[in-house]
Amino acid sequence: MKLTIKEMAIFSMLGTVMYVSKILMELAPNIHLLGVFTVAFTVVYRKKALYPIYIYVLLNGIFSGFTTWWIPYLYLWAVLWGAVMLLPRHMPLWVATPVYMTVCALHGFLFGTLYAPAQAIFFGLDFKATIAWILAGLPYDILHGTSNFFCGLLITPIVSALRFAEKNTGGSL
């Protein structure tokens, strides 16, 4: 996956947009556009979407610390990326919109469960304690998944804007 200078610039900006959006929305717990951006970038850029996603992850570590909370980010966003990669590429808009919203929501609902293996390893939790940790986080996961669903309404407009920009800036990426 060789990158052009144009792609490096675009992916750097998109990863930064993800990070800045997270910072701007930190007052609302578990409500953010990270899933929306991950899905939209994956729909448009496919494998290359990993570049802005991991620029975001790297920026998180740089500005918030490369500590135990950060390490699951190395795989959490790849799970959402992988799920979107498995979706059909050419869905009609009336199908794509609810599918993208649902996948985004599922990632939010499962975020704590996906995060739990790292917690168990880092803090020596047994199976029972890991389940208790997941259950304790369910209210946050419910909020996360619900907000991801409604924020998911922005996915198809972002996809359209990215495709429009790509088409009108001298060719595809």
Image (cartoon, rainbow, N blue to C red):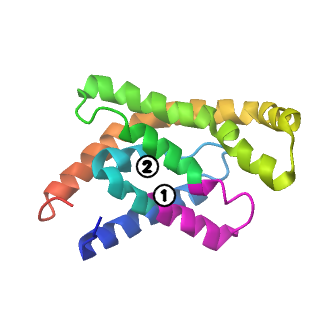
Q: Residue visible at 77% across and 35% down?
A: 134
Q: Which mark is residue 156?
A: none
Residue 160's spot in the image, x, y percent? Answer: 25, 44
**For residue 52, what is the image quadrant?**
bottom left
For mark 1, does the 10 Å Cα neighbourhood hold few (<14), some (14 to 19), or many (20 or more) residues?
many
The segment highlighted magenta reads 53-74
Disc 2 and disc 1 in contact, CB within 8 angstroms: yes
Q: Is residue 12 left or right of residue 122?
A: left
Q: Answer whether residue 33 is visible to the viewer in this image.
A: no
In the picture of the structure, the residue carrying the numbered disc 1 is 18
Q: Is residue 147 left or right of residue 163?
A: right
Q: Residue 22 or 129: which is nearer the viewer?
A: 129
Q: Residue visible at 70% across and 70% down?
A: 65
Image: 74 above or below 33: below
The rendered magenta stretch, by its main secondary structure, is classed as helix
Q: Per the image, is 60 magenta?
A: yes
For mark 2, does the 10 Å Cα neighbourhood hold few (<14), some (14 to 19), or many (20 or more) residues?
many
Residue farthest along the bottom direction in this orientation: 5
Q: Earlier in the sequence, mark 2 or mark 1?
A: 1
Q: Label 2: state its secondary structure.
A: helix
Q: Residue visible at 73% across and 42% down?
A: 116
Residue 16's spot in the image, x, y percent? Answer: 46, 66
Residue 30's spot in the image, x, y percent? Answer: 65, 43
In the picture of the structure, the residue carrying the numbered disc 2 is 37
Name the residue type under label 2. Answer: Phe
Residue 73's spot in the image, x, y percent? Answer: 61, 55
Q: Residue 169 or 134: which is nearer the viewer?
A: 134
Quarter in which the C terminus is drawn:
bottom left
